[in-house]
Image (cartoon, helix red, strand yellow):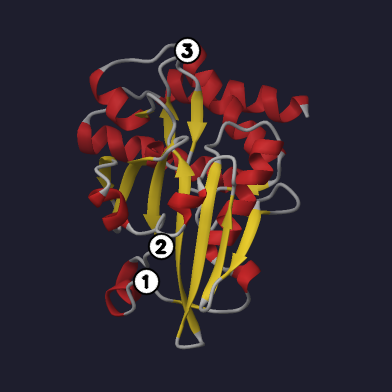
Amino acid sequence: MEQITLADGQVWFDAALLTEAELDNAFEPTFWQHADKVIGSAKGRGTTWFVQGERVPMALRHYRRGGLFGKIVEDQYWFNGWDKTRSYQELVVLQHLRQSGVNVPRPVAAKASKVGGLFYRADILIEQVSGARDLVALLVKTQVEQSVWQAIGAEIGKMHRAGVCHTDLNAHNILLDGDNRVWLIDFDKCMQRAGADWQQGNLDRLLRSFVKERNKVGIDFDEASHWNWLLEGYRDTLNAG
């Protein structure tokens, strides 16, 4: 990753994925809108914009707070060093996971900007996975095979083997591409951790997510078969390390 120092912040970017012409305004949704390069969007805490770059399609996300505090301070965070900003830390985690062989999108660029000296705002650009489908949306409409459930578990196993705790591991953060290849996404606030006592917590959170989505939107999910298949793939992969 290359680094640029701005008057009020820092930008880190992969020059192989983002052109110099795009870099100046890459974190501004209006830039992509005026260039007619917005190819989609998704709603969460804010809007994630899917944009067509010169080299790769990307997802642009502005960091926003959740919960009650987020209603007061929407998108500002306490500044404690550039390497502690959420955008930089997510970029580093993604790079580490890719180097560890985990299927996560390539980070394209990240930005952090000071606000009044004590706070900062942040944005990140991540390569969009071509043909990816949200696992929840998929399971509402169809079943997935045993091998896919095992592959989901295997990918989580690789992530844990790389020492990364996904603090929001849920069914929406698992994607399948056109070849049914599994991808893990949304690594905001995630980190490398020593030991293994946190791993079961990740799995418990994911199981609760599947049960919640089954009750909420009727996804095809069964603990006795699907979850056990996922655990088979997880344990085989984690133990293989």
Q: Few, some or many C-alpha atoms within 10 Å of disc 1 (few <14, some 14-19, many ≥20)?
A: some
x, y percentage for residue 69? 34, 76
x, y percentage for residue 226? 44, 21
- Viewport quadrant of the C terminus: top right
Residue at the spot of label 3? 146
Q: Secondary structure at mark 1?
A: loop
Residue at horizontal 44%, vertical 50%? 22
C-alpha distance separating marks 2 and 1: 6 Å
- In the rendered structure, find residue 63 and report the number of the disc placed on it: 2
Q: Secondary structure at mark 3?
A: helix
Residue at the spot of label 1? 75
**Which amino acid lies under the numbered mark 3 shown in the image of this protein?**
Gln
Q: Earlier in the sequence, mark 2 or mark 3?
A: 2
Q: Earlier in the sequence, mark 3 or mark 1?
A: 1
Q: Are marks 3 and 1 in contact (CB under 8 Å)?
A: no
Q: Earlier in the sequence, mark 2 or mark 1?
A: 2
Place residue 145 in its image quadrant.
top left
- In the rendered structure, find residue 168 and report the number of the disc placed on it: none
x, y percentage for residue 62? 38, 60
Residue at horizontal 50%, vertical 46%? 19
Judge whether residue 229 can be spotted in this image: no
Residue at horizontal 65%, vertical 47%? 164
Place residue 172 in its image quadrant.
top left
Q: Are marks 2 and 1 in contact (CB under 8 Å)?
A: yes
